[in-house]
Image (cartoon, grey):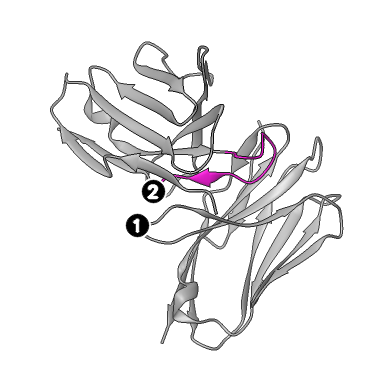
Amino acid sequence: GAVVSQHPSWVICKSGTSVKIECRSLDFQATTMFWYRQFPKQSLMLMATSNEGSKATYEQGVEKDKFLINHASLTLSTLTVTSAHPEDSSFYICSAPPTGIGYEQYFGPGTRLTVT
Amino acid sequence: ILNVEQSPQSLHVQEGDSTNFTCSFPSSNFYALHWYRWETAKSPEALFVMTLNGDEKKKGRISATLNTKEGYSYLYIKGSQPEDSATYLCAFDGGQLIWGAGTKLIIKP
């Protein structure tokens, strides 16, 4: 099946610094990728839809200036958490639908972010 | 507000026993219902995509049913094995995926 990698798998950073998370589709092209956040014992919450070559679409309540998304190629999307604060500590996971929206998605393994 | 509920939140099952759990979702604007298995430290893996009311899908010992009119889907696991231990997620697709919080299944040897 299609493979999505995510890097890093975990990161600890100090409050006020920025962290970049990469999501790569390894064996298919993804014009669209999704970024999710999951707090403990809660559902995956869609943060934004990353579109190759254009601006990302952010969900209501997600600050686009804080969570910068870049989808510069058909295989790579990045999420940068700028000026991170402890409340940004969460599990971030990306996914891509190789056959289009509405079909099954392939997920990365996720990134555990801890802001101290 | 569209809500997807999964129950139970967690489940301990003896190896060899069969089990099932539920995903409840809105009964309007239905496109598809997705089931995923998420093992610890791995990526969520798609199990089923179900689109038709009355749909029943099967993959090995795992099967799922769908009732779009009343807004629920059941996932069944027959003869549970330790490798079935995982969190099972469902997602309602009404044009955008809305996820349940998952059912964490632990198989006791």
Give the image location of residue A108, x and y in percent: 42, 44
Q: What's under tag 1, amino acid-wise? A: Ala
Q: Residues within 10 Å of mark 1 (few under 14, many from 20)?
A: few
Bounds of the magenta span?
A97-108
Q: Residues within 10 Å of mark 2 (few under 14, many from 20)?
A: many
- Chain name for mark 2: A
Q: What's under tag 2, amino acid-wise? A: Pro
Question: Residue A7, which numbered label?
Answer: none
Looking at this view, is A6 or B81 the one in front?
Answer: A6
- The residue at which mark 2 appears reads as A109
Picture residue at 34% right of the left edge, 57% below the top:
B41
Picture residue at 54% right of the left edge, 89% below the top:
B16
- Chain name for mark 1: B
Is B107 magenta? The answer is: no
Up-down: is A87 above or below A114? Answer: above
Q: Check contact, mark 2 vs mark 1: CB within 8 A.
A: yes
Quadrant housing residue A8: top left
